[in-house]
Amino acid sequence: MTKFAPRLTARLIHQFLESSAALHPEQIAVVHQGEAVSYRELNWRSNRFAHWLIDNGIAPGDRVPFIMENGIDYVTVYYGILKAGAVAVPLSTDLKPASLRPLLEELAPSAFVATSRFERLLKATDYPWPLLVIGNPKLAWQALSVQVAALDEIVRTPSSESDTPKLDLDANRLASIIYTSGSTGKPKGVMLSHRNIVDNANAICDYLELTARDIQMAVLPFFYVMGKSLLNTHVAAGGRVVINNKFAYPAAVVQEMATAEVTGFSGVPSTYAYLLHRSPLAKYRDRLPALRYCSQAGGHMSAHIKQELLRILPSHTRLFIMYGATEAAARLTYLPPEHIRVKMESIGIAIPGVTMKVLDKQGNNLPTGQVGEIVGAGSNIMMGYWKNPEATAKALDAHGYHTGDIGYCDAEGFFYLVGRRDNQLKIKGHRINPQEVEDALAASGLVIESVVLGIPDDLQSYRLAALAVPRSECCHQQKIRHLLSEMLPTYKIPHEIKFCRNLPMNANGKIDRQKCLAIMTANPKQL
Amino acid sequence: MAAHKEKVRAFIIDNFMFGSADGLTDETSFLDEGIIDSTGILELVDFLEQEFGIQIEDEELVPENLDSITNVHTFIENKLSA
């Protein structure tokens, strides 16, 4: 167990909340737009929601999907579903009716929860709705014979004590299904048990040295596994989560980092690309005395951005580079910050409780320095994919979880990624790793983020192309190609660079390469 | 000036609302209504700088200055008269 925080032992995810409510009842758990809720109040609200679900026939194992933007109600609903023994299924807030319906069909939910903003989405989705819980419902549902309840009435009024429902739940039972979009095919529902998430959260608390004094600024959606991990780890430690959903206005986020005295900030690569591009972060260097660390996960971040962050962040702020997958309940490795300057491109070492290996195609362990597939094992590895035994059999075997990432381990046990198994390109006889070209594009200083792809051409071969978000409108591909020519051999310079406003993301906040390819190959008039 | 406000409105409608002003009032929050995302804000800032010849500081990228037509209009008028 942890070396740092006085935590009670949790077997089940919602026991993190119950333990913190017992140890620090008055401590503020979550802050959002001026509203603050204590651990005691949050626990009572979640208990009320759990009792309401049970009273309305929700049984252990039933799936309860929910579509909600980050907020105090999100946290209440998430722990409430778990306390009722049901399976929490957080859904992306970007879903449209056509993509929501197939998920509902395979989940066969017993209830569905949404904030008011999504009421129209539900109405537009042709599905025989089960029990619906909507923040503050406004549309006419009676004609459709759908039972609709108001979340506000269930959890917010009146505030009164509520006990945890008495259920005998096993730590190995299914707790949550989190959808992830692979590089191909339909989204896969990653099944995580209570143990998967509890063990991973405890390991993260240990290496980040989280305590009840920690205050995290959450700009990442909680429906991402990384966002959910930020929530669970801080609730486990009895810390505080400050929710800010206005990352589009970076100055507002940086200001709140200072006024809320946050000790931790976490982002995916694009979060940091935008913060460095246009925010007053550098000017706030002296106004962030509490900022203990920043962490990054959710894909490879270029060395250029890491170096810029190390230059701009306060000298006492440590930068944690982390690596994981939804299938690993979030985290597999982290780079201890003291190594970042000498091992800048490394994803670090296995987190406590995880074993990492590099395997060849036959499943043999590869020696130091040799490139193979990265495979992780530990009590955080998923139970499998929901109703998808074929995909489960491909991802899981006796060695553990096959990440699909290609990499190697150095003599000191630090892991490095060189690319995705699916993304390696072979162009005119040259093997090209898109990551290397994307890093060069970042180093050019002219693009905020980019993706490098192989486009099929008429000669049954591929040509190299890039889709990039330019820093300014007056950015020309010739200028970028010229700068790349100083960094890369000619065959690694994209034949074509197309600009777009932003790169499409998949459900886990990673760049969706299939959609990027579709944009690259689309007729310009269709864009 | 009313003409400035109309230029801002036209830019928002043409660039982020596919040319349809459906439901857009002077007070509509660009972010809450899903009209503009992170990159959209940067495009809006580029537009304002070029169109009105003003310099927008990184610290000024806050909703109070940019999150509705009224907010943007007040912000640029203050900039222009400064």
Image (cartoon, coloured by chain):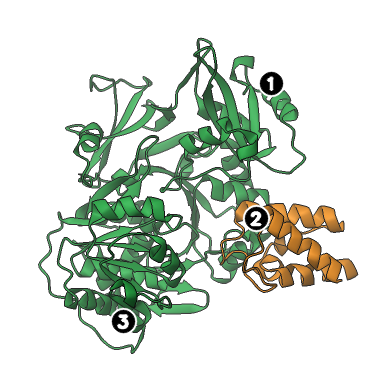
Q: Colour of chain A?
A: green
The spot of residue A42 in percent (x, y) is 34, 77
Q: Which residue lies furthest to the right in this view?
A: B81
- Are discs 1 and 2 less than 8 Å apart at CB? no
Left or right of B28: which side holds A99? left
Q: Is mark 2 on a helix, strand or loop?
A: helix
Q: In this view, does A287 lie above or below A485?
A: below
- Residue A526's quadrant in the figure? top right
- CA distance separating discs 3 and 2: 37 Å
Three-letter code, disc 1: Ser
- CA distance separating discs 1 and 2: 35 Å
Q: Colour of chain B?
A: orange
Three-letter code, disc 2: Phe
Residue on which disc 1 sits: A485
* Residue A37 or residue A286, whichever sits in front: A37
Subunit that carries the residue with mark 2: B
Residue visible at 34% across and 31% down?
Answer: A404
